């Protein structure tokens, strides 16, 4: 994302995972347009519902979301069977 880290509540994680499923579907179908739209929606949602982690706080990440300009082929190497975000 290039915009930092965000903390998500368990409730928010459910919503994020729902959008992440759309990212996974788009990658599996090889549909670049659907992938770009779903990835942008995922980035937007995380920024909307997540609480930003301060820049001076160093914590590990459960997941990393690629830039919305990432190609489907590039994303394939980043995915697990759960998508970008672990369930």
Image (cartoon, helix red, strand yellow):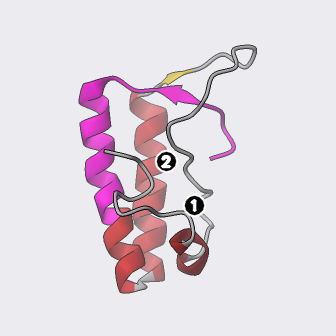
Contact? badges 2 and 1 (CB < 8 Å)? yes
Q: Residues within 10 Å of mark 2 (few under 14, many from 20)?
A: some
- Looking at the image, residue 33 sits to the left or right of residue 78; the answer is left
- Looking at the image, residue 82 sits to the left or right of residue 80; the answer is left
- Looking at the image, residue 4 sits to the left or right of residue 39; the answer is right
Q: Answer with the quarter of the image where residue 22 lies.
A: bottom left
Q: Which circle marks residue 43 in the picture?
A: 2
Q: Nearer the viewer, residue 7 or 78?
A: 78
- Whole-Å distance between the Cαs marked 2 and 1? 8 Å
Locate residue 28, reporting x and y percent.
37, 79
Question: Is the residue 10 above or below the residue 73 in the image?
Answer: above
Total numbered labels? 2
Q: Nearer the viewer, residue 78 or 41?
A: 78
Locate residue 65, reporting x and y percent.
55, 50
Locate residue 18, reporting x and y percent.
25, 51
Question: Is the residue 11 above or below the residue 53 in the image?
Answer: below
Q: Please report the residue visible at 49 percent of the width from the left and 35 percent of the height from the top.
A: 47
**Residue at the far right in the pictured view:** 56
Q: Which circle marks residue 26 in the picture?
A: none
Question: The residue tagged with tag 1: helix, strand or loop?
Answer: loop
Q: Which circle marks residue 68 in the picture?
A: 1
Q: Please report the residue visible at 49 percent of the width from the left and 47 percent of the height from the top.
A: 43
Q: Earlier in the sequence, mark 2 or mark 1?
A: 2
Q: Please report the residue visible at 33 percent of the width from the left and 43 percent of the height from the top.
A: 16
- Looking at the image, residue 71 sits to the left or right of residue 13; the answer is right
Q: Answer with the quarter of the image where residue 50 lies.
A: top left
Q: Residues within 10 Å of mark 1 (few under 14, many from 20)?
A: some
The C terminus lies in quadrant: top left
Task: Please give the range of residues in magenta.
Answer: 1-22
Locate residue 73, reporting x and y percent.
57, 80
Question: The residue tagged with tag 2: helix, strand or loop?
Answer: helix
């Amino acid at each position: 994302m290039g915009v930092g880290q965000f903390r998500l509540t368990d409730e928010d994680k459910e919503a994020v995972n729902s959008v992440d499923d759309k990212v996974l579907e788009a990658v599996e179908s090889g549909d670049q347009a659907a992938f770009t739209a779903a990835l942008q929606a995922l980035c937007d949602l995380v920024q909307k519902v997540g609480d930003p982690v301060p820049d001076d706080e160093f914590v590990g990440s459960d997941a990393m979301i690629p830039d919305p300009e990432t190609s489907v082929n590039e994303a394939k190497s980043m995915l697990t069977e759960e998508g970008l975000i672990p369930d």
